[in-house]
């Protein structure tokens, strides 16, 4: 099964190396531990080009995120054609995250889920990292509703944890005044670089085709020449041998006159030949009886 696994979190995930899994990660990238997740990290060994890393700078908003998420994922689906998708929706990319540097809203987050639904593939939807409790709960509730095609009211209903969602007590969150450092020129450069890497993928990978070796198909004539006379042959081979012998046997006239050129010791008679031989045997028996009668 071909599987597409991708993340929408800040941190980079370790790429898979098998050809049956492709990973795509949209994340915040900076040079700190483990120092991976750069645009040039494309996988290793047999998994080269099967790892797609999309590094963002601080402050990316809904419009900028969608401008690169949609074309990149469309290209990946077109080239890889997965049979299943594992989608991890990390809540640390939302606006207001204490340790985060992104400026996404629930609607921008949910548009990514809506896009993945349009390809009618099996989807395993997962949550992700996040430490702002109310944003995480709202995010996963909203995206579950997106998957199910349900509309949710923005005003939260009263519940035992209602006080944690103050002061507005609403489902959706707003943008902050964070500066978006992901300028269009930077995003376009990333997109073109990713398209070039994705283009290196073989179209719709599957079971690899291999050439049949020269001695892979056994010739039927070899079976006849190399057959073991002490080994019992199958019914199919026996019928085939009988038909061949009958085809090249002598004519009935030659048999009746005794002028056939067959080697009777190794000849297997067909139905017509067997009947002629039986009549000849009866004649020989009658002649033998006549000679015995004369002697008596």
Image: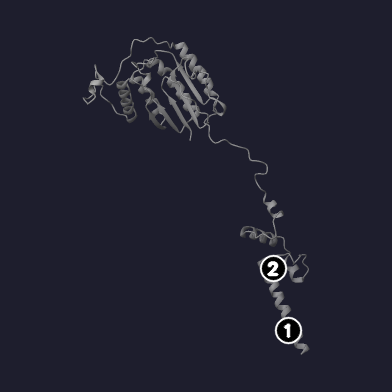
Q: Decide: few, some or many residues near mark 1? Use Cα within 10 Å; few <14, some 14-19, many ≥20.
A: few
For residue 41, side relative to residue 168 (left or right): right
Q: Position of residue 286 (x, y in %)?
A: 72, 81
Can you name the residue that lies furthest to the left here?
158
Task: Please identify the quadrant where the C terminus is shown.
Answer: bottom right
Q: Nearer the viewer, residue 53 or 212?
A: 53
Asked which secondary structure carries label 1, the reply is helix
Q: Nearer the viewer, residue 60 or 292?
A: 60
Asked which secondary structure carries label 2, the reply is helix
Residue that appears at 46% across and 29% down: 4
Which of the marked residues, 2 or 1, is nearer the chain's N terminus?
Answer: 2
Q: Position of residue 38 (x, y in %)?
A: 50, 18
The disc at residue 40 is none
* Residue located beneath label 1 in the image: 289
Relative to residue 139, is residue 220 depicted above or below?
A: below
Q: Position of residue 90 (x, y in %)?
A: 38, 23
Examine the image and state in which quarter residue 48 appears.
top right
* Residue located beneath label 2 in the image: 273
Alpha carbons under labels 2 and 1: distance apart: 25 Å
Residue that appears at 77% across and 85% down: 291
Relative to residue 197, is residue 278 depicted above or below?
A: below
Q: Tell me, what colour scheme is on the image?
A: one colour
Residue that appears at 42% across and 24% down: 7
Examine the image and state in which quarter residue 88 appears.
top left
For residue 227, side relative to residue 33 (left or right): right
Instruction: Nearest to the eye among marks 2 and 1: give it.
Output: 1
- Disc tally is 2
Q: Decide: few, some or many residues near mark 2? Use Cα within 10 Å; few <14, some 14-19, many ≥20.
A: some
């Amino acid at each position: 099964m071909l599987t597409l696994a991708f993340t929408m979190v800040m941190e980079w995930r370790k790429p898979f190396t098998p050809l049956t899994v492709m990973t795509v990660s949209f994340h915040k990238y900076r040079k700190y531990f483990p120092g991976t997740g750069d645009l040039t990290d494309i996988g290793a060994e047999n998994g080269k080009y099967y790892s797609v890393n999309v590094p963002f700078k601080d402050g990316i908003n809904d419009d900028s995120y969608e401008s690169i998420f949609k074309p990149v994922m469309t290209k990946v689906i077109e080239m890889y054609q997965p049979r299943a998708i594992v989608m991890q929706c990390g809540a640390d990319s939302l606006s207001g995250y204490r340790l985060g540097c992104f400026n996404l809203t629930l609607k921008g987050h949910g548009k990514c889920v809506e896009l993945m639904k349009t390809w009618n593939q099996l989807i395993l939807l997962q949550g992700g990292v996040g430490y702002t409790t109310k944003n995480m709960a709202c995010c996963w509730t909203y995206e579950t509703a997106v998957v199910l095609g349900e509309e949710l009211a923005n005003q939260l209903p009263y519940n035992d944890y209602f006080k944690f969602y103050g002061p507005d007590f609403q489902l959706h969150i707003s943008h902050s005044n964070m500066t978006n450092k992901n300028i269009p020129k930077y995003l376009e450069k990333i997109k073109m670089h990713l398209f070039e890497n994705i283009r290196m993928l073989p179209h719709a990978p599957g079971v690899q085709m291999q050439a049949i070796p020269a001695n892979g198909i056994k010739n039927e004539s070899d079976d006849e020449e190399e057959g073991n006379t002490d080994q019992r042959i199958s019914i199919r081979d026996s019928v085939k041998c009988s038909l061949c012998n009958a085809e090249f046997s002598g004519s009935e006239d030659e048999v009746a006159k005794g002028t056939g050129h067959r080697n009777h010791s190794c000849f297997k008679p067909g139905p017509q030949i067997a009947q002629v031989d039986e009549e000849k045997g009866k004649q020989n028996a009658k002649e033998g009886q006549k000679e015995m009668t004369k002697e008596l």
